[in-house]
Amino acid sequence: MNPGTAPGGIRFDGVTVAYGGTVVLDRLDLTVEPGEFMALLGPSGSGKTTALRAVAGFVRPAAGRVFLGGRDVTALPPHRRGIGMVVQSYALFPHLKVKDNVAFGLKAHRTPKAEIPGRVTEALELVGMAAYAERHPRELSGGQQQRVAIARALAIRPGVLLLDEPLSALDARLRSGMLAELARLHRELPDVSILYVTHDQVEALTLADRIAVMDRSRLQDCGTPEELYRRPRTEFTASFVGNANLLPVTVTGEGAVRLGDRPLGVLAETGTAAAGATATLCVRPHLVGLGDGPNALTGSVTEVQWRGSTHRVHADVDGHRVMADLRELREPPAIGDPVTLHYATEDAVLLPAGAGAGAGDPTEAGP
């Protein structure tokens, strides 16, 4: 944005929010750096939208403080926080043209009248909607309406942009296009901190510099997308940020575990449990191969799903379900067939047993 953008950065300092005695956000400590794109990822009821509303000023914390650009805004009303916000329903005024929808926030912020047309044009150009300034929302597609909503939020030149499930109302094709648009906006707005609430792990992995994983009103994990995907620290993170095979094992030594009577290997630096301790072995389905190899898992096929470029094969291995995403299987195995799967030791992570569990069925978490 042009010079004059409000200071960015968000800090939650022990923020707790409760409704009628029920805690919906529990002691959140989290910092979003100036210019950072942070995704709040979690299932419904995890506290992520409550955290965003606490930043916006729509809910008042029962404890803790919220800082924007280093300023304590806990007691400030929303209109004095200098933030932009976009919600999933777009919230455009149907009777106003696109240009007037974008100008609405500027007028509310008492921007000098002479500046408004230029600021409206700037914001619409940023989202590729300048040619639609004279149209009404009903004349736009869902994706175009969402771009206008983003332009309205950006017109006030906020230091902080809040996005609450902004793509959930779009179909798959429009969602893909908007992901690319949001990634471009992040590149073109290096000073704006973005807090993005979603339950969709693909959106979080695609867009965010860091992901804060929420569950049961608490922050469970935080890191870069690659850190959380390749080296998750809890079972919840492993199962919610991508799919994962999570197998109960017993530690037998450094980098060595046992699944029942099967000796298996794990990346040594990820497991610090003493020999004899129980733990959870985590390996992603796309890192599981078909046929003999190191860390062999023999069992029988229980399900085969064709997913276009891959087949997802489910196998029962000593009573445990193991998933493998296999490419270009011209003759996939049939249900009931014996099968041998394997993985490379460096692709397996050891997690504390049961830590952060409770994500539900990991097979429904996404790719």
Image: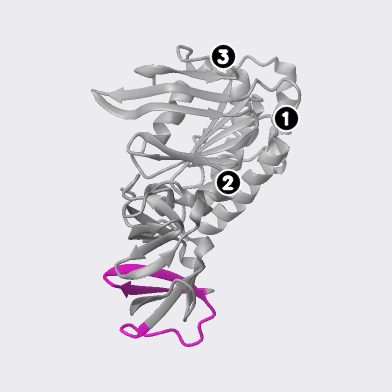
Left or right: 71 with respect to 15?
right
The kind of residue on which mark 1 rests is: Met
Q: Earlier in the sequence, mark 2 or mark 3?
A: 3
Q: Is residue 262 above or below residue 77?
A: below
Identify the secondary structure beneath mark 2. Answer: helix
The kind of residue on which mark 2 rests is: Glu
Q: In terms of depth relative to the viewer, which is nearer, 63 or 245?
A: 245
Q: Which residue is mark 1?
A: 1
The kind of residue on which mark 3 rests is: Arg
Q: Which residue is mark 3?
A: 71
Q: Nearer the viewer, mark 2 or mark 1?
A: 1
Q: Earlier in the sequence, mark 2 or mark 1?
A: 1
Q: Residue at x 47, y 62 (%)?
A: 284
* Position in image of residue 298 (x %, y %): 37, 78
* Position in image of residue 358 (x %, y %): 31, 48
Q: Which residue is mark 2?
A: 139
Q: Earlier in the sequence, mark 1 or mark 3?
A: 1
Quarter of the view holding residue 319: bottom left
Identify the secondary structure beneath mark 3. Answer: strand
Q: Nearer the viewer, mark 1 or mark 3?
A: 3
Q: Nearer the viewer, mark 2 or mark 3?
A: 3
What is the span of residues highlighted in magenta in the rendered image?
310-338
Q: Residue at x 37, y 17 (%)?
A: 63
Evaluate if marks 2 and 1 touch, with contact meaning CB atoms under 8 Å apart: no
Residue 315 magenta: yes
Q: Residues within 10 Å of mark 2 (few under 14, many from 20)?
A: few
Mark 2 vs mark 3, CA separation in Å: 41 Å
Left or right: 262 with respect to 119?
left
* Position in image of residue 361 (x %, y %): 32, 57
Identify the secondary structure beneath mark 1. Answer: loop
Mark 1 vs mark 3, CA separation in Å: 21 Å
